[in-house]
Amino acid sequence: MKKNKILIAAIVFVAVIALVSIVHATGTDSFAGTGWALLPALVAIGLALITKEAYSSLFIGVLLGAFMAAECSVTGTIDTLTVDALTAAVADNAGIYIFLVILGIIVALINKSGASRAFGTWAQKHIKTKAGALMATFVLGVLIFIDDYFNCLTVGSVMSPITDSKKVSRVKLAYIIDATAAPVCMIAPVSSWAAAVSGCVESENYSGIELFVRAIPFNFYSILTFVFIIGIVLLGIDYGKMSGFEIKAQETGDLSILDVDPNKDHNRRDVEENGPEKPGRGKIIDLVLAILILIGLCIWGLVRNGYQTLGGEGSIIDAFSETDSYVGLPWGSIVALVLIIIYMLIRRIVTFEEAMECVPKGFMAMVPAITILVLAQSLKNMTNGALSAATFVQDLMSNAQGLTWLLPAIIFVVACIIAFATGTSWATFGILIPIVSVIFPETSSLFFVGISACLAGAVCGDHCSPISDTTIMSSAGAQCNHIDHVSTQLPYAISVAGISFVTYLLAGLFDKFGAAWISIPVGIILTVVFLFVVKSMVKSKKTA
C-alpha cells in the first residue's frame, strides 16, 4: 500500500512538472497572476487526500510552486525553494512556532503533575454522557474566542481526557475544535481575526471594527456551523467517514490517537507522562490555574503589543485592531510558562528535574504540527507571493459585477475556493475585501452582506483545506492523524457550506427587506431538516 502511494505521488509530480515545462516552452514567460498560480496548492491538496500523507504532498506542492516561480530553471527552483519558501516560512512565523513549543511544554507539565488525570476523574463523575462531553468541548471552544491557534491547542489538551473517557474518537474531537475555533473568532469583535479584518479595510465612513461588527449578522457559515454542531451532538448522528471512526471507538475503544503504543490503554494517559499516582500530586485546581494563567497572560500580551503599536493610546478595541498575535502570543506564553513552573515547584507537584524534562518532551510533541505548518506556509508563499494568485482572482471577480443579486453567493464560493486552495483565511479576505468594496459601494444595501460573504467563505475554505494552519492546529490539539481529520470533517463542512450558499442567495434577493432576518431563520430550518433527514437515512441503513 505504501509503495502504491509513493508511486502515485511520483507519477503526479513528474506529470505536472512535464505539463508545466511544456506550457512554458510554448511561450508562457510567467505563470504569475494566472490560473496556473493555484496549481501547486491544488496538487498538494489532491495528493494529500489521495495518499493520506501530508508531508510529501505539501513538499511536492512547494517544489512545484518554486519550479513555476523560477520559470522552470533548476538552479532557480532550488534558490526559490530555499530562500522564498522554506526560510521565509520559518522566519515569518517564528513567533507562532515558539508559541506552539511553549504550549506543548505547558501541556507536558500539566500531564506530569497529574492534574490532567485529576480533571479526567472529575469529568467522568460529573459529565455522564458522550453528548455532554462534546457539548462541554463546544462551549469551551466558544469561550476561548481570542485566537484560533490558542483555541485549537488549549481546547484539545483540556478536553481530550473527557472525550476519551466517553469513547469519542480523536477525529470527532478535532472536528468540534476546528468547527468552533475559526467561526467563533470570526464573529467575536475582540479577537485576532477581528483585528486582521480591520487591517484590510479602507473606508471613509466606517472604522475597521465597526465594519466587522456590522457584518457579523450576515456571517451565515459561522452561525450555521454552531447550529450544525449542536444538532449532531443532540441527535447523536454521524455520517461519512466520521461514522466509521466513531463506531470503531465505541465498539473497540480505539480512539485513533496519533502515535500511541497499541499495547497501552487508549482511554487514559500513560503513567510516564502523568507521573506516578500519588494522592498528594496534581489536582483540578492546578490545571484550572495553569489554563487561567496562560489565557490571562496571552490576552495581556496581545493587548500590550497593540498598545505598543498605538504608542500607548487608544481603547482595548483599538489595541486588538493593531496587535500582532505572532508577537503577543509568544510573549504571554513565555511569562505564563515561567509562572506555571514556579507555581508547580511551590506546590511540590513536580520537581525541578521533572519540569526540565518537560521542555524537550513538549517540543517533540509539537514537531509534527510545526513541520506541516512550515510546509503549508511555504506553499502559501509560493501561491500568494511568488505566483501572485491575487491578481488572477481580482480579474475573475471584476467580470461578475453585472449579477448583483447573485454576487453575495458568488463571493462566498470564490472565497471558499481561494481559502481551500491557499490554506489561509486571512490572505483570502485580504485579497477579496478591497475587491468587494469596489463591487458594492458603501451606500449599497448589499455592502455588509458582500463583506460578510467574503469572510464566511474564507472561514469555510480554511475549514476544509488540509493545508490550513487552523486545520493543522486542530489535528495537533486532538492528537489525531491530520489527513483523517480532513477527510472526516469535509462532508460536515460541505453540508453547512451548501446551506450557507442558499442563505446568501436569499440575502441577495431580499436585501431590501432585511437579509439577516430572512436568511438566518431559513438557514437554521434547513440545517435542522437536513440533520433529521440524515438521521433517518443513517437509521434506515443500520436496519437494512
Image (cartoon, rainbow, N blue to C red):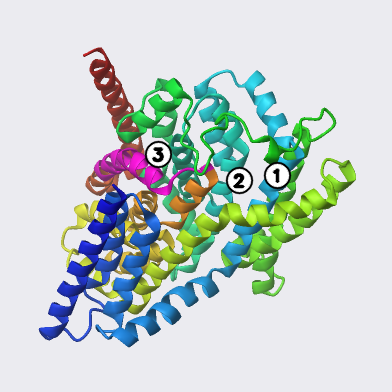
Amino acid of disc 2: Thr
Residue where numbered disc 3 is placed: 225
User: Residues under labels 2 and 1: Cα distance?
Assistant: 8 Å
Give how far across and how far down residue 344 sits, in percent.
83, 45
**Residue most extreme to the left:** 26
Give how far across and how far down residue 518 sits, in percent.
31, 37
Nearest the eye: 409 or 33: 33
Q: Name which residue lies at 51% across and 29% down.
A: 134
Q: Which quadrant, please, contains the C terminus? A: top left
Amino acid of disc 1: Ile
Residue where numbered disc 1 is placed: 291
Q: Is residue 170 above or below residue 107?
A: above
Q: Secondary structure at mark 3?
A: helix
Badge 2 vs badge 1, beta-carbon distance below 8 Å: yes
Looking at the image, is mark 2 or mark 3 nearer the viewer?
Answer: 2
User: Residues under labels 2 and 3: Cα distance?
Assistant: 20 Å
Stretch in magenta = 478-503
Amino acid of disc 3: Thr
Nearest the eye: 85 or 400: 85
Give whichever of discs 1 and 3 has the lower sequence position: 3
Q: Is residue 351 above or below residue 74?
A: above
Q: Secondary structure at mark 1?
A: helix
Q: Secondary structure at mark 2?
A: helix
Q: Name which residue lies at 65% across and 72% down.
A: 310
312 drawn magenta = no
Residue where numbered disc 2 is placed: 154
